[in-house]
């Protein structure tokens, strides 16, 4: 059996207290996934997850090149901006870049996107390495602003009951 | 990829379904290990092993009451991080759903090019 994840939802784990790891399998070869991550007109189509409009999608995909992505949200009409620099590029396989959320200057993280193809499918891993746990937690916490907290599952019910 | 130690933090510790069951039981109040053995239908060594993991990440506290050890839930290490992770996971799931659509189109384009070349 293939070990490539076939699940359609992202898995998020916290391998260390200053890291976030996102994994997902895709039913496509890695060179197409790579294109979708490195071509602005393609990034524009998925990165906002329909929560807003991408007003800036600048990407100079080469080592030392910079990137800047800006989204204006549908709800609340506020601007969310990120920028950084490409640190390492292995075409079709790996993209290492720094990332700074402009709402939190100085809290720069390093993202490593790795693509591994198996039987025509691609396993994507996105490892975000923060400088410290506080920055990592703030990054995770920022997702709450979307107001899209998932339905409560058992684990959460347990935690809430303690509050 | 190296597997993260399940004891590394509270979130990973509760990835195990039996441990979630234990937390669910303890949410109703503190219990001795024997209660958990009965309620979960597991052997005591297994329950003890899960309790040890949960104690290591601070989700379960233990106190000696007479000759019994009572286990009690402490959900605070879990609450925030869990909420954050679920929200973050949701964001990325939605992005990747859109990415799937893009990839299907790219595959189709590539297929069209291939057939044109033939």
Image (spheres, coloured by chain):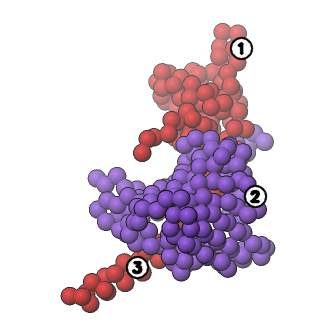
Residue at figure coordinates x 60%, y 58% from the top left:
A98
Disc 3 versus disc 1: distance between alpha carbons?
65 Å
Q: How many callouts does the rendering have?
A: 3
Q: Nearer the viewer, residue A154 or A120?
A: A120
Residue A5 is situated, as x and y percent measured from the top left of the image, at 40, 56
**Residue at the disc numbered 1:** B65
Chain bearing tag 1 is B
Left-right relation of B109 to A50:
left
**Residue at the disc numbered 2:** A104
Q: Secondary structure at mark 2?
A: loop
Residue A156 is situated, as x and y percent measured from the top left of the image, at 66, 47
Chain B in the picture: what colour? red
Left-right relation of B104 to B53:
left
Q: Which residue lies most toward the left here?
A: B118
- Asked if badges 3 and 1 are on one and the same chain, I answer yes
Crowding at dot 2, Cα within 10 Å, few <14 / some 14-19 / many 20+, comes out as few
Q: Nearer the viewer, residue A45 or B98?
A: A45
Residue at figure coordinates x 38%, y 69% from the top left:
A31
Residue at figure coordinates x 57%, y 21% from the top left:
B34
**Residue at the disc numbered 3:** B106
Left-right relation of B65 to A3:
right
Q: Which chain is purple?
A: A
Place residue A56 in its image quadrant. Answer: bottom right
Q: Which residue lies most toward the bottom here?
A: B116
User: Can residue B26 be seen at all in this image of the molecule?
Assistant: no
Disc 1 versus disc 2: distance between alpha carbons?
48 Å
Crowding at dot 1, Cα within 10 Å, few <14 / some 14-19 / many 20+, comes out as few
Are the residues flagged by discs 1 and 2 in contact, CB closer than 8 Å? no
């Amino acid at each position: 059996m293939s070990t490539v994840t076939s699940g359609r939802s992202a898995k998020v784990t916290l391998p260390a207290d200053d890291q976030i790891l996102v994994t997902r399998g895709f039913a496509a070869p890695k060179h197409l996934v790579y294109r979708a991550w490195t071509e602005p007109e393609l990034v524009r189509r998925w990165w906002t997850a329909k929560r807003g409009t991408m007003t800036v999608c600048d990407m100079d995909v080469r080592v030392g090149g910079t990137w800047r992505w800006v989204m204006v949200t549908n709800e609340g009409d506020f601007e969310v901006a990120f920028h950084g620099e490409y640190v390492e590029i292995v075409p079709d396989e790996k993209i290492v870049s720094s990332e700074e959320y402009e709402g939190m200057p100085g809290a720069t993280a390093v993202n490593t996107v790795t693509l591994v193809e198996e039987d025509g499918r691609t396993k994507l891993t996105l490892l975000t390495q923060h400088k410290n746990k506080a920055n990592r937690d703030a990054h995770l916490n920022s997702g709450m602003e979307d107001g899209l907290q998932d339905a409560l599952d058992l684990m959460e019910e347990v935690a809430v009951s303690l509050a | 990829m190296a597997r993260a130690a399940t004891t590394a933090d509270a979130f990973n510790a509760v990835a195990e379904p039996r441990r979630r069951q234990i937390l669910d039981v303890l949410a109703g109040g503190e219990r001795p290990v024997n209660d958990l053995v009965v309620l979960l239908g597991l052997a005591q060594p297994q329950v003890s092993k899960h309790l040890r993991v949960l104690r290591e990440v601070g989700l379960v506290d233990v106190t000696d009451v007479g000759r019994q050890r009572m286990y009690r839930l402490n959900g605070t290490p879990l609450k925030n991080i869990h909420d954050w992770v679920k929200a973050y996971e949701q964001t990325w799931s939605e992005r990747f759903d859109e990415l799937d659509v893009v990839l299907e189109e790219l595959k189709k384009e590539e297929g069209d090019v291939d057939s044109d070349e033939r």
